[in-house]
Structures are given as C-alpha cells and as structure tokens.
Amino acid sequence: MNELKGKYAVITGAAGGIGAATAETFAREGAAGIVMADMDGGRAREAGKRIESGWDCKCMAVKTDISSASAIKNLFFESVKQFGTVDILVNCAGICPVGSIEEIGEAEWDRVMDINLRGTYLCSREALAIMKEKLSGKIVNLSSISGRIGGIATGINYATSKGGILTLTMSLAKAAGPYNINVNGVAPGFIDTEMTKNFTHFKVETVPLGRIGKPDDVADVILFLSSDRSRYVTGVTIDVNGGVFMA
Ligand SMILES: NC(=O)c1ccc[n+]([C@@H]2O[C@H](COP(=O)([O-])OP(=O)(O)OC[C@H]3O[C@@H](n4cnc5c(N)ncnc54)[C@H](O)[C@@H]3O)[C@@H](O)[C@H]2O)c1
C-alpha cells in the first residue's frame, strides 16, 4: 500500500479514464501529491477532489493543452511551485480520432502528432530537466496496441503517433539512464473509456483473457513502472491487452 510513499507525480490526461484511474492508484499507494493536468480543467479538478476525499494525497488541477510548449512549461513551473519537485511523469493525454487516409488530411495528421507524440516529448523534456538535477525519476508513456501492429479502427495518424512513442521511450531511456531515470511505456489494447465508447468493431472473443480491459488494468502496470520495483527496467513498453497481441 506504500509503493509510492511521499512521491510527487504529474499525470497528463488525468481527467480521462486511464489517467484518473492512475491518479487514484498512486494516491492509494501513498503518493503525497499529484498534478492533474488535462485540457479539461473542470473534470481534472473533480477527479482530484474525489481522490482527496478518499486518501491523504494533495491534488492540484492544471488546465493544460499539451500541444502547446508554453502551456507545458507553465505546467511544470506550477508543479514545482506547489510540490517542490516531480518524481514521476505519466504521459497519458491523447486523442484517437478515426478516419481513412483520404479523410485525415494534413491538418488532422499534424494535430494528432502534436498532441500524442510531440506532447509526450515536450512533457518528458521538462520533467527530465527537473529529474536530472536530483538523479532520480520515472517517466511512463502511453503507447497502444495500434503502435505495435498498425491501426485497426483507429486512424493511421493515431497508430503512427503511438508507434513513435515506442521509439521515443527507448531513446529517452538511453539518454536518461545515466541520471538514474527510468523511462518506460505501456501499450494498452481495448480499454473501456470515453475514448473507445463509439468503437463497435471490437470483438471480445478475440481476447484470450476473455474480457475487455478496464482502466485499473492499465493503472496497475503504470504503478509498477513508476515504483522502485521496476528499478532495473528501462526502455521497455509493456503490453496490457489481455493477450490480443503477444510480442
Ligand atoms: N482506451 C483505450 O483502449 C486505449 C488503448 C490504447 C492506448 N490508449 C491511450 O491511453 C491514454 C489515455 O486514454 P483513455 O482511454 O483514458 O482516454 P480518455 O479519452 O478517457 O482520456 C484522454 C484524456 O486526455 C485529455 N486530452 C486530450 N487532448 C489533450 C490535450 N491536447 N492536452 C491535454 N489533455 C488532453 C482528454 O481531455 C482526456 O481527459 C491515451 O494516450 C490513449 O491513446 C487508450
């Protein structure tokens, strides 16, 4: 119950299904403070209040658009001002629009890349500057099964951004390793959240474990990668998909 005792985390996309479940899991495991960063500041605040009412963990919501470099700078400035440091960053914010190659167009391609891939890079860059100073830290990135095997119902821009996150995770891990900072990822399969509520193509019969994933299934793996238990693991992306894809 004390895997993250006294730790301070920044979670992007903290108002969403997996982000909020991760924040709750961190609070349950003794985190001292969580910065709930999300484009939807109101829902991030509500999620933070729910957590504060259940656990001894301070939550601060910061409305942040992770496609904006200046908004991200502000996020980390506010985080350090409030909690003094950042021990853990979870890059969970993301969008998953669907559409064929013809429908996507250049602007939509760029929008998905800017949020999913560039946002993950920019947040990691800011967190690394803080973590390098104290020679410790954990970064966990959200990839996807579509980054492994290509998009199924998801757009090619989404799948490509998530494939980029696999490579970004390995590259950041190599750069951050000498500073005792672990950078890892998770690649969820189909998880029941707002993001997937209109996905009708998915067949539960294709899942060896026989059910659709829940946000907690992913949050528990993020917890492992954020805790000391994964101290000798870096550059790895763990599949959390019920067995749909096995590396
Ligand atoms: N649900 C799944 O099946 C699944 C599968 C694979 C990967 N993922 C990944 O997991 C992560 C979380 O997804 P989820 O299922 O919880 O979805 P979700 O839609 O419930 O949550 C995503 C959150 O990101 C926030 N967000 C979107 N754009 C943003 C921006 N520009 N700046 C800041 N915040 C922004 C949204 O407001 C939302 O709260 C995403 O990166 C997603 O790609 C999800």
Image (spheres, grey):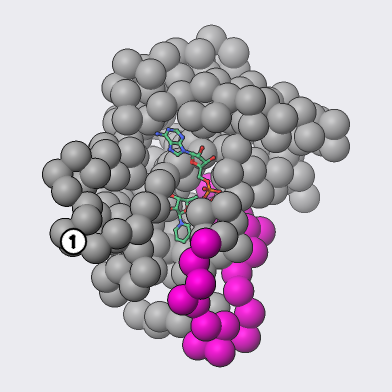
How many numbered dots are placed on residues in this image? Answer: 1
Question: Which residue is outermost to the top?
Answer: 81
- 223 horizontally vs 70: left or right: right
Residue drawn 47% across the image and 44% down it: 92
Q: Is residue 93 magenta?
A: no
In depth, the one of 142 and 210 nearer the eye is: 210
Range of the magenta residues? 198-226
- Residue 111: where, in percent of width, then height? 26, 39
Q: Is residue 204 magenta?
A: yes
Q: Examine the rendering and report whether any part of residue 231 can be seen.
A: yes
Image vertical order of residue 55 relative to residue 129, above or below: below
Image vertical order of residue 161 relative to residue 110, above or below: below
- Residue 236: where, in percent of width, then height? 36, 61
- Residue 29: where, in percent of width, then height? 72, 45
Question: Which residue is outermost to the right?
Answer: 54
Q: Examine the rendering and report whether any part of residue 160 can be seen.
A: no
In depth, the one of 16 and 59 nearer the eye is: 16
